[in-house]
Amino acid sequence: MGNEADYSPQKGTRLHPESVNLIPFTCMKTLVKPLAYLIALAFFTFACSEDGHEQPQPQPGKAVNEWGQSMLQIEQIAIEMEQIARGTYPNGSRFLACSSVQNEATPEGLETTFTFSGTSPCVDGKTRSGKIIMFTSNNTNLERIIYLDNYLVNGTRLEGAFAFQLIQVPGKASVIRMVSSNAQVVPTTGGSYRYSLNRVTHLKEGAGTPNDTSDDVVEIYEGEYSCFKHNGAFEASLVTPVVVKKTCNAADNLKPVQGKIQMEMTTGQKSILNFGNGTCAAQPFAE
């Protein structure tokens, strides 16, 4: 393994949009290569900061039920993985500060491994163990895979691989498509579930300050999700764009503050998860 180093390039230059199609890696670590092909296929076959000072306020609507809580957790995991891929968690900041970081350069790209010991909580108060492995290809378009290896957060096992690619969209900055197929959440209390996602985000604000990510506002403007549990399943899609503000993200509060996602159960029942009114005090509720 190589020496510890900062894995992320500058915000304004880290990705190079050359193609809208994910090209599978031709050479990668044995562990990651099969996942890259599977996730690349999912691109075409997917079917199914700073601490805010405002205090949380009661929100209108209904309490978020079991399915809404799963949807919220899926999106929080996606946000966290995307921020690593975007390089907005430079080495030594946020929860990555409680990991050891090693880089290994290969002819095909760079493999970065974040290893968490699980001996003490990270800055967000959560205890992590296992590894987050990120492979960044040398190809000119973004080919970045994040793979979770025996990764636990407060005892909950998170499994899966996530693929990222920068694409060109007129009028939008730093657009990234993120795909994951058959990821899994396994709580210690039971009630595990599998999920898939295909979402597209862009920097709604912050693109003009490439060396400062604290002012970034990320908007999810396309998204499809599926979730499968032992007692049912749902598919979900955006009703309105979902917004994540870095200025609102306290260390323990990584969640959207605006936007709506509609969930449709296999029974036909529908519900909407509303993330709030866009203020840092926003709390999710059901419609």
Image (spheres, rainbow, N blue to C red):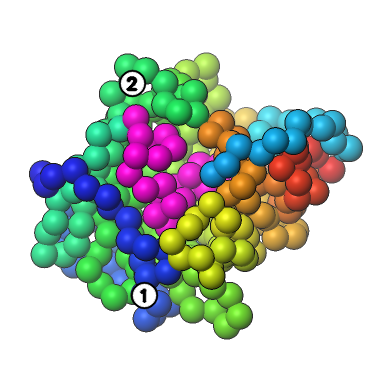
Q: Main secondary structure of the magenta part?
A: helix
Tell me the residue that label 1 is attached to. 16
Vertical position of residue 126 compared to residue 141: above or below: above
Residue 167's disc is: none
Picture mark count? 2
Position of 69 compared to 11: left or right? Answer: right
Q: What residue is at 33 percent from the left and 21 percent from the top?
A: 118
Q: Is residue 263 magenta?
A: no
Position of 26 compared to 154: left or right? Answer: left
Structural crowding at the residue carrying mark 2, measured as other residues with C-alpha within 10 Å and reported as few (<14), some (14–19) or many (≥20): some
Vertical position of residue 16 compared to residue 214: above or below: below
Q: Which residues are magenta?
A: 71-98
Choose between 192 and 77: the one closer to the eye.
77
Q: Is residue 78 magenta?
A: yes
Position of 209 compared to 234: left or right? Answer: left
Q: Amino acid at mark 1?
A: His
Q: What residue is at 49 percent from the left and 29 percent from the top?
A: 124
Q: What residue is at 61 percent from the left and 47 percent from the top?
A: 247
Q: Kindly state the secondary structure of the residue where label 1 is placed.
A: loop
x, y (%) of residue 133? 28, 44
x, y (%) of residue 185? 48, 33
Tell me the residue that label 2 is attached to. 118
Q: Amino acid at mark 2?
A: Gly
Rounded to the nearest angstrom, the CA distance separating label 2 from label 1 is 36 Å
Choose between 130 and 212: the one closer to the eye.
212
Choose between 1 and 157: the one closer to the eye.
1
Q: Earlier in the sequence, mark 2 or mark 1?
A: 1
Q: Tell me the quarter of the picture where residue 108 sits.
A: bottom left
x, y (%) of residue 14? 36, 66
